[in-house]
Image (tube, coloured by chain):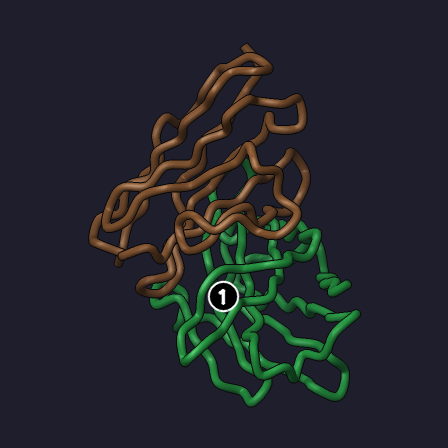
Chain colours: A green, B brown
Amino acid sequence: QLQLQESGPGLVKPSETLSLTCTVSGGSISSSSYYWGWIRQPPGKGLEWIASIYYSGSTYYNPSLKSRVTISVDTSKNQFSLKLSSVTAADTAVYYCARHYYEQQLLFWFDPWGQGTLVTVSS
Amino acid sequence: DIQMTQSPSTLSASVGDRVTITCRASHSISSWLAWYQQRPGKAPKLLIYKASTLESGVPSRFSGSGSGTEFTLTISSLQPDDFATYYCQQYNSYWTFGQGTKVEIK
């Protein structure tokens, strides 16, 4: 059964860079049928897609965050990562990684999701 | 950007009730819509994709319908496990979510 697990610092200072890693187990990140994505959820609020990546390195970014976001993949470790620069308090959220269904050059829904990790931006 | 608007934001219901949640898209998204359930402190769980296809293992009391700009999620007989927040998500153009509908105990 595929599982995803987020890891990274729970506290980041304003203006610094948030860095998270998602480790995939129970399946290969190099599958041709999936992209891999990051989604976040501010406390008490809704869900926002951040970015998605294919094992080959092909990427999609949320236009509203694109200037600050970098997503990368390490197939040798079965991991993908997120970097968000110049963070502010507005970036405080639970960050989820998830498998992003892909078929015929289209991306669809997210399933499954990792358990999520809370990242707080504060000095 | 395609905006997704859910209604109501909160819904109070009792066990056994039939519950309907609506999701409206700002532009037509054909049937490119998924529904998720999120219990407190947990990750979202996929319930339905392609507007009406039930994900494997999801109880049949959940159903989805609609196309274009208006969609519904129906729970035919609400069970204790179903008290949660539900989100719709479009995948016609990028990937955006509705603001959520919380189903609470009446």
Residue A86 x/y as whole percent: 49, 66
Q: Quadrant of residue A3?
A: bottom right
Q: Is residue B76 left or right of residue A66?
A: right
Vertical relation: B81 (above or below) B88: above
Residue A40 x/y as whole percent: 54, 54
Vertical relation: A123 (above or below) A25: above
Vertical relation: B72 (above or below) A5: above
Q: Is residue A30 left or right of residue A40?
A: right
* Residue type of the residue flagged with mark 1: Ser
Of residue B92 and residue A118, the one placed in the foreground of this image is B92
Residue at 31% from the left image edge and 44% from the top image edge = B66
Of residue B99 and residue B23, the one placed in the foreground of this image is B23
Residue A68 x/y as whole percent: 45, 70
Residue at 70% from the left image edge and 77% from the top image edge = A79
Q: Which residue is mark 1?
A: A86
Residue A91 appears in the figure:
yes
Q: Is residue B19 left or right of residue A2?
A: left
Q: Residues within 10 Å of mark 1 (few under 14, many from 20)?
A: few
Q: Is residue A57 left or right of residue A8?
A: left
Of residue B14 and residue B56, the one placed in the foreground of this image is B56
Q: Residue furthest top?
A: B106
SS for dot 1: loop
Residue A44 x/y as whole percent: 53, 35
